[in-house]
Image: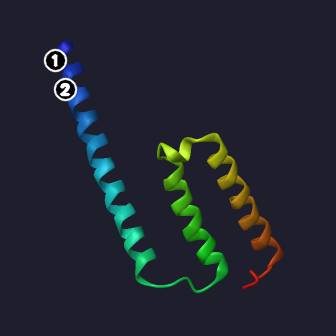
């Protein structure tokens, strides 16, 4: 029974490591695609910014409540402006 439990744990750990490696590869592929061509629309640019902001929020500095509030506010702006179809003023 203990040997079976240990075998199951090893299999599960190997599966988790394989999934993590696949996720890292997909993330690298996404980032390569994001870096290869400029955004075609403001909505696409906002999507790129959302992705980067989510990465930032996973950092020590991004966990600061003030910064989290700023990011949340910016994401709300993106969503509102995308719904309204408003174009940023340059």
Label annotation for residue 7: 2
Residue shown at the point (31%, 41%) measured from the top left? 16
Q: Is residue 57 above or below residue 6?
A: below
Which image quarter: residue 87?
A: bottom right
Q: Is residue 10 left or right of residue 55?
A: left
Question: Residue 42: image x %, image y %?
Answer: 66, 80
Residue shown at the point (54%, 55%) measured from the top left? 54
Q: Nearer the viewer, residue 68 or 34?
A: 68
Rate crowding at label 1 as few (under 14), some (14 to 19) or many (20 or more) other CA atoms within 10 Å. Answer: few
Label annotation for residue 71: none
Q: Is residue 64 left or right of residue 59?
A: right
Residue shown at the point (45%, 85%) measured from the top left? 37
Q: CA distance from mark 2 to mark 1?
A: 6 Å
Q: Is residue 16 left or right of residue 3?
A: right
The answer to whether mark 2 and mark 1 are in CB contact below 8 A is yes
Residue lying farthest to the left in this orientation: 3
Count of all numbered marks drawn on residues in the image: 2
Q: Quadrant of the C terminus?
A: bottom right
Q: Secondary structure at mark 1?
A: helix
Q: Is residue 57 above or below residue 46?
A: above
Q: Which residue is mark 1?
A: 3
Which image quarter: residue 30?
A: bottom left
Question: Residue 70: image x %, image y %?
Answer: 68, 53
Rate crowding at label 2 as few (under 14), some (14 to 19) or many (20 or more) other CA atoms within 10 Å. Answer: few
């Amino acid at each position: 029974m203990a040997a079976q439990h240990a075998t199951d744990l090893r299999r599960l750990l190997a599966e988790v490591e394989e999934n993590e490696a696949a996720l890292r590869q997909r993330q690298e592929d996404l980032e390569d695609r994001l870096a290869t061509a400029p955004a075609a629309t403001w909505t696409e640019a906002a999507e790129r910014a959302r992705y980067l902001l989510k990465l930032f929020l996973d950092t020590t500095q991004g966990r600061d409540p003030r910064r989290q509030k700023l990011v949340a506010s910016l994401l709300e702006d993106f969503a509102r402006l995308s719904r309204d179809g408003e174009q940023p003023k340059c």
